Amino acid sequence: MRRFAATFIAVVLFASAITVFPATPPKSLNVPVVYYKLPNGLKVVISEDHIAPVVTVAVYYNVGFRLEPKGRTGFAHLFEHMMFQGSANVKKFEHAKFVEANGGSLNGHTDFDYTNYFQTLPSNRVELGLWLESDRMRSLDVSEENLKNQQNVVSEEVRVNVLNQPYQLFEWISLWENAFTNWNNSHNGYGELAEINAATIEDVRSFFKTYYAPNNAVLSVVGDVDVNEVKKMVEKHFAAIPSQPAPARADLTEPPQTKEKRVSQTDKLANLPALATGYHLPPQNSPDFPAMALLVQILQTGEGSRLYQRLVKEKELTLDLSGGLNYFGNEFDYTGPMIMTTRTTYKPGHTADEVLREMDAVISEIATKGVTDQEVANAKVQYRSNFYSQLEGSQGKAHLLSALALFRDDPQQINSLLTPFENVTAAQIKTAAAKYLVPANRTVIDRVPEKKGTN
Amino acid sequence: MKPALALITLTLLLTPAFAQQKTPPPPGPARPLNLPKITEKKLANGLTVVLAPLPNVPKISSILTFRSATTASDRKAHSGIAQIAAGVANEGTDTRTSKQLKEELRSIGGTLSLGSDADSTTMSASSLSEFSTKLFDLMSDVAQHPSFPETEVKLAQENTIQQIRAGRADPGFLVNERFQKAIYGDHPYGFVVADEKSISALTRADLRAFVTKYYIPNTSHLIVVGDIDVDKTFAEIEKAFGSWKSGEAPAEENPAVPKREKRQIYFVNRPGSIQSAIFIGNVSIPRKDKDYFALRTADTIYGGSFYSRLTRNIRESKGYTYSPFSQSNTRAKAGSFSAGAFVRNEVTGPTLLEIFYELDRMRVLPVSDEELSAAKEYSTGNFSVELASQFGLAGRINTVYTYDLDKSFINDFRPRIEALTTADIQKAAAKYFDTYRAAIVIVGDWDKVKDQVTPFGEVTIYDADGNVVTKQPS
């Protein structure tokens, strides 16, 4: 029975395999965007979307762990925790109570170049979200006791996600420490336990005053709301928050790397060896950047990518492949220097050199022979598909709109963001590979188990 | 904060119209719920097709569930076969190589992967909606004609074994594995991963026989959510899946779930560990049980939400841990309730004490009206958010069909939650937060924490590979 069915399908498939893809015009997405600034400098983005009765209220501050003070690694993230410890009219941890008791969920996240806070609520509770965010932006209240409590909590976070884990996030923390020379870029953003615990209440107050001012932030409201009503609420809750002098921008520039960096590490907890590489990327406004983004897609995104096929399937050297253009986010939600990372766990009995040799062979094929037009077409489709997935919910949309407001002062770009990527040619991808994916531009870390594997 | 406050006060005096509001603003009028419009149809071969338009982005998201292909299926002859079959099914069909499949997926902005668990094997797939025909074609091909090429089977066996070895370094993997074994014993629900010998013994013929028997349309359902037109999509599905031949529904294996007699500690020794990974729990109820909503809500109040009792206690008050949790995990034939936390070695004993204290408090005393009302809002509000994402809605519909729930489940969710009383919550906690017979599973450094652990019960110590090292009476 199966055989007949199989034969029938085979014929159909053969037909479809030689047919060029139907030229259905790609569907596009049009996100309505209202953007303005309050007199105190707060950037406000409002986007209506009535598909579900929910709303996301998000505040993005223009400070991430690159800007935390020296001697205080992990401070930007510790500070994020302090934002849930109460303000003038909201007691410690009550932020969570208000949001959840009103049918919502909430979180915060600290990244390279921003720290965000967001709540998704039933849309008729939008003003609650605005009130909560305005109260802590205006009047964060911190105590020694709450600071000590959150230093303990964050220390456990670092233990559970880094120190007690095999590999200890080496493809982020160690790779960045080695790939970058400027402290702002290179230091451990999750933080050393001793430095997390050395933070004082004065550090918290000064960081708040410097970076958590309305003129250093974006407020986004996305979902089932009315723009004009939201504008009035925003005015009511945020307009009176005083602005602060703009923080001095730190120098994030990175000297060009001229020689390959190789690092060997041992791991007390891991059972298998792993390898990570990082290549410095061109800045986002470079004409090479869209080509690099599609190159990453072709090279290492998904099981159809060239590196996955070579390392995992053809050569059977490694078990997995992960990484990408921005370790935490996407092409649009950072500003400082960035590396393209690749991480792979390889099989015992093999060496890092074997893995690297295959990686280099794959790269060199692209740099010398280029990629096929079909690969470029597929990469663009995949890129568009992934892009739409990011915009599926109010939270994802709020994220991208906030990043575009924060870093480009232009969230309207959300509707034309794909264009430069759609215009990339196979020749540009070849050129980008030859220019950036060279050993002199990379850092390699080989991390092997201290004990022999379990076999 | 003094100087900052002084400054703010001054500002407020100047702009009295925008005085800082001291109390939370009340909600506006309730908005329409927009419950999804769900259409169910059946193909001639018995495949149930469920469609729900959700055009939030120009994509579609799909789940194809084989309800017959569970952890229990064929487990006596071939332990772990459902998992390996799911892992290799999309590595080649009778007419496509693995590489061709992945390339075709790229050309439609697609994803397609399979996974198996105690109640089913599911294929999750998505693509741009303009390529829906192609996506259904690929899904149908993988469902009907996976070829299990020798090289792919061999590679998957080797890699699975290595991945399990890698996982044995991770406390999260170890604590979950030991917990499932502790509460379910030899019941198929206690299965997490197969041993290396069983994995190596599987052959291509075993795998082909497995999918022929268990991947059949008449015990499967296909859910498609997204930017779809119901009639057009159904026609595309009929074309892609119509030729799938039905089979004989395999007899269900239904062994009894073991009952625990006493509280016991299962300690996985991980020398050098700087934290103890703790799971405490017991078997609870199957998904269809009448207590589902009460237990789910008790879980929300105890540790299942951020502003939960457990989080307020051992995180916000005591600073023992980052992310304490509890979960009510209900399945077709049984379920479990568990609470847990990852804590520094020094507070292992105190954490056990607080987890038990909070469990017992909910068994003995009713929760407050305020807590219950907050939990209800939390559940119903977040349900709406879940239904607004394609895979969120598809996942919800999938539980309805996998667990044979009332078709009105999604519409009834809100009234069922709203009907709960504080007495319902206490009854559910008293019954299912069974501290007296709890399994306590800890992954950590035995030498460092043993004195804190032994007061809580009899201990069996395991190594990371699951071997019993020693038993210690309390």
Image: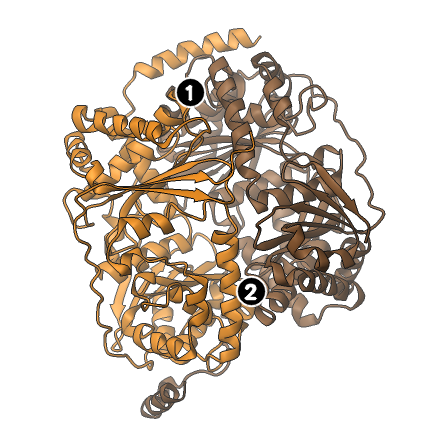
Chain colours: A orange, B brown
Residue at 50 percent of width and 59 percent of height: A157
Left or right: B371 in relation to B396:
right
Q: Element type at marker 1?
A: helix
Give a yes or no on whether discs 2 and 1 share a subunit.
no
- Residue type at mark 1 is Ser
Residue B231 horizontal/vertical position (percent): 47, 31
- Residue type at mark 2 is Glu
- The chain letter under disc 1 is B
Q: Residues within 10 Å of mark 2 (few under 14, many from 20)?
A: many
Between A80 and A9, the one nearer to me in the picture: A80
* Residue B26 visible in this rendered orientation of the protein: no
Q: Which of pointers 2 and 1 indicates the residue nearer the eye?
A: 1
Residue at 72 percent of width and 44 percent of height: B461
Looking at the rendered image, the quarter that the C terminus of chain B falls into is bottom right
Residue A392 horizontal/vertical position (percent): 40, 48
Residue at 26 percent of width and 25 percent of height: A361
For label 1, the residue is B98
Between A72 and A431, the one nearer to me in the picture: A72
Q: Which mark is residue A100?
A: 2
Between A354 and B23, the one nearer to me in the picture: A354
Q: Element type at marker 2?
A: helix
Q: How many numbered tags mark residues here?
A: 2
Q: Considering only vertical position in the picture, is A177 above or below A276?
A: below
Q: Considering only vertical position in the picture, is B232 above or below B276?
A: above
* Residue A22 visible in this rendered orientation of the protein: yes
CA distance for labels 2 and 1 = 45 Å
User: Which quarter of the figure has residue B244?
Assistant: top right
Left or right: A412 in relation to B21:
left
